[in-house]
Amino acid sequence: MVTGGLSATDHGYFPIIGGYTREFYKEAAATYGQQELDHAKDWLSEPKVGEAIFNRWLKKAKVDVRLGERLKEHGGVEMQGKQVTALLTEDGKRWQGKVFADCSYEGDAMAEAHVSYVVGREGSDTYGESLAGVRPDTPKHQFLWKISAYDDHHKLLPLIDPGPLAKGKSADRKVQAYNFRLILTDDPVNRMPWTRPAGYEPSQFALLKRYLQTYKEHTGKDPVLRTVTNPVCFVHRKCDFNNNGPFSTDYIGKSWTYPDASYAERQKIWNEHMLYTQSFFYFLATDPSVPQSLRDDTNKWGRAKDEFTDSNGWPRQLYIREGRRMIGVYVMHQADLQTDRTKSDSIAMGSYNSDSHNVQRVAMPDGSVFNEGDVQVPVQPYEISFRAILPKPEQVTNLLVPVCLSASHVAYSSLRMEPQYMMIGQAAGVAAALAVEGGVPVQQVPIERLQAILRKDGTILHLDQQAQHATSKIRSER
């Protein structure tokens, strides 16, 4: 996602981001003449800049990168006892190794290796989490005035689930909304116009139409593009456009089946998300029912010609905010972000809010429409356990899972940010090397040695370390 449209880095507290991750963002900032990472704007960069950095690093490290080698859908992981011996790809190749890491958003190798995992939300009783499960109180990105979920014939409007809403704090198998993070520009030289996508159906935006037509009445303001999107702007008149408000770029309720879906079904979901995104902006730019202020503002913006040049300016990566989550040696949960924030086996730190997007849009008993599932709760810096990327030893002994890691839905809502993925990924790489070197299961990698290597490479592991790091930096600046 760092090179797929997510330019507005979800950084949280700057000083806890270290290791190769900080080096990446420093190199990106240096592209624009900025040498430090002291302000939020210093963490913003164009996708093409990030892609160029990653490619340079791979080339320098002489990494053999193979693209399009997709895991065989069934039987893609070859095992002997508790060890993965090879990965099999669709083209018939067999990829042997001593230690493997499933670094994907989907976790297919993890699942094929019969590692325990969960999809959806735990109930509050599973880990004693107050933020868990269905959330009847969802104030953010919500309809702030009553809007009917039905048309004049009492037929449910598109993109609304009939309900009923399940009991508060109960578990389900639903996942938060996905979207595409668009890079748009208002520079006429670099801007592409909005065009009608094949399959465009304006009727699916009936609810959005109602919202926009009542917006000024309830707010006293004319809607503009910021009303229904969240642009974070950076260099060259470009912005990363994300979801904002009750009806935006999140395709709410359409991601539930993605984690366990077949490749064909996932591609269908991907295509539907792309069509929704293209249709959303085309609707805002052209539909006569959209207030003129919003139409005019939307048409000031367009896809940047110099980003995603091989896909007509549309991002290549769907934002998989959450999918499968491993049930590993240790499951990170709400307390690990709030009260039990230290870990003796820490491999990195996190600090971004507990942030889950809405999970569903439901018709309520009074006829109104309600968005459910959003979580936005601040956290203080916390430590991430090495055990959270380790499968249970009775299942697999030579696999690391740094993205679909072991965490509850609540904890994952903070852990899922790209800087954390990157730092955890660095730790997984070091752990894999140590496991190979020592000829031991990944669960038996000596944590002291792993942490020593990570510290040497600039990773911030503990709360006292990040405090010292911040203090020393202030002194050096003075």
Image (tube, grey):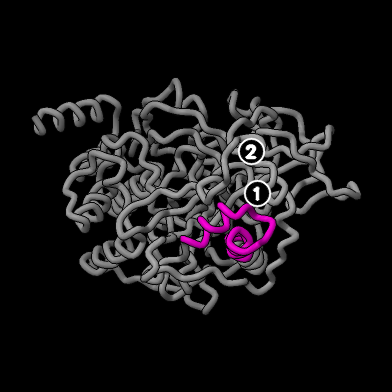
Name which quarter of the figure residue 254 lies in: bottom right
Q: In this rendering, is residue 8 above or below 355?
A: below
258, 144: nearer the viewer: 144
Name which quarter of the figure residue 468 lies in: top left
- How would you rate the neighbour count of disc 1 (Cα within 10 Å): few for under 14, some for 14-19, many for 20 or more? many
Magenta span: chief secondary structure: helix
The three-letter code of the residue at mark 2 reads Arg
* Residues at marks 2 and 1, CA–CA distance in whole angstroms: 15 Å
The three-letter code of the residue at mark 1 reads Ile
- Which residues lie in the magenta part? 274-300
Q: Is residue 97 visible from the viewing direction of this image?
A: yes
Mark in front: 2 vs 1: 1
**Residue occupying image coordinates x 59% and y 45%:** 117
Residue 241, percent across and down?
A: 47, 53
Q: Is residue 440 visible from the viewing direction of this image?
A: no
Residue 201, percent across and down?
A: 72, 65
Farthest residue, direction right: 153
**Residue occupying image coordinates x 46% and y 37%:** 414
* The magenta stretch spans residue 293: yes
- Residue 437 lies left or right of residue 113; in this view the side is left
Pointer 2: what residue?
121
The image quadrant where one finds the C terminus is: top left
**Residue occupying image coordinates x 67% and y 50%:** 256
Residue 333, percent across and down?
A: 52, 31
Q: Secondary structure at mark 1?
A: loop
Pointer 1: what residue?
252
